[in-house]
Image: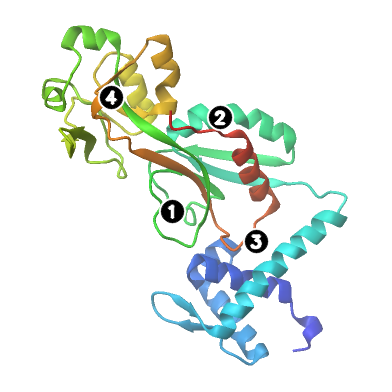
Amino acid sequence: MARSEVNRSGELEVFVRAIELGGFSAAARACGMTPSAVSKLVSRLEQRLGTRLVNRSTRQLQLTAEGCAFYERGVRILADLEDAERCVSAHAAPRGRLRVNANVPFGHHFLLPLVPEFLECHPDVTLDIVLTDEVIDILEQRTDVAVRAGPLKSSNLGARKLGSTRMVIVGAPSYLTRHGTPAIPEELLTHNRLGANYKRAQPGWPLRDKDENIVFPVTGNAQASDGEALHHLALSGLGLARLAAFQVRDDIAAGRLVPVLEDCNPGDVEEVHAVYVGQGGYLPLRVRAFLDFLAERVNISQG
């Protein structure tokens, strides 16, 4: 096949996606192809270059030394190509549908209030927002950006840190008037401890008791599927809840919620990241614009 007949940039993009996503099937979903088509494309690429780029197994792709060099140069080439198109195009603006997944507290306190400003800045982008505290597979859900709280698992996804927040146990004044304010962890046994029923929820509340780290079980009479629902249950006076500080800062200042057992708070924090496909730096313009916007506007502090 003559070189002029080869869509080298298209081949390069599929190859980079396959490496970043860890396999032909994932790359096929991302590129709207079949796994066999991706496999054949990479084989043709290797045949044309005259060298093996990846060692295939049933579980993963492993780059050869030549494949590693080709991947690294390819990522830079794709990024340069997008920059070149953006510089010369009269219509170089983020456009298209952007699917965003976020945990519910972040969505309510940060993301949704910022949506009007983002869309005003980028009128050719359409946002498709899903809020859930369940951790989704962003490839299966065809999600561009997902905001996640807590430790990140090792993956081929890129990530940008948006901040971190400390956790605090709170109760409404009406609840504390009826049941008393716990002074030591053991007194939690007589309190209604509201918990979460999503998979990533911690099994208990970490506390410090006499210089010892303990995890106190959560066995209240209500559970909820997201942190914002627990927030509302705590505000209603149903029981105690352990929530992110940014969720309850205004409520504490206004006296709607009261922090308890702060002397026993271990000071643990939850980091918040925006994760996305494209760890190597090649990102659609709409995704890059959204990530930059979040990094500039979101300020999650530990206080």
Type of amino acid under label 1? Asp
Question: Which of pointers 1 and 3 indicates the residue nearer the eye?
Answer: 3
Residues at circles 1 and 3 in contact by the CB criterion of under 8 Å:
no
Q: How many numbered marks, from 0 up? A: 4
Q: Which residue is mark 3?
A: 282
Residues at circles 3 and 2 in contact by the CB criterion of under 8 Å:
no
User: In the image, what residue occupies the spot 65% across and 44% down?
Assistant: 292
Q: Which residue is mark 4?
A: 262
Type of amino acid under label 2? Leu
Upstream in the sequence, badge 1 or badge 3? Answer: 1
Type of amino acid under label 3? Tyr
The answer to whether 63 is drawn above or below residue 233 in the figure is below
Upstream in the sequence, badge 3 or badge 2? Answer: 2
Type of amino acid under label 4? Glu
Upstream in the sequence, badge 1 or badge 4? Answer: 1
> Alpha-carbon distance for marks 3 and 2?
27 Å
Upstream in the sequence, badge 2 or badge 1? Answer: 2
The x, y position of residue 74, in whole percent, is 66, 72
- In the image, is 49 to the left or to the right of 182? right
Disc on res. 137: 1
> Alpha-carbon distance for marks 1 and 4?
36 Å
Circle 1 packing at 10 Å, graded few (<14), some (14-19), many (20+), is few
Circle 4 packing at 10 Å, graded few (<14), some (14-19), many (20+), is some
Disc on res. 112: 2
Picture colour scheme:
rainbow
> Alpha-carbon distance for marks 4 and 3?
44 Å
Give the image quarter of residue 72: bottom right
The x, y position of residue 212, in whole percent, is 16, 39
> Alpha-carbon distance for marks 1 and 3?
20 Å
User: In the image, what residue occupies the spot 43% across and 75% down?
Assistant: 60
> Which type of secondary structure does the marked residue at label 4 adopt?
helix
The x, y position of residue 208, in whole percent, is 21, 34
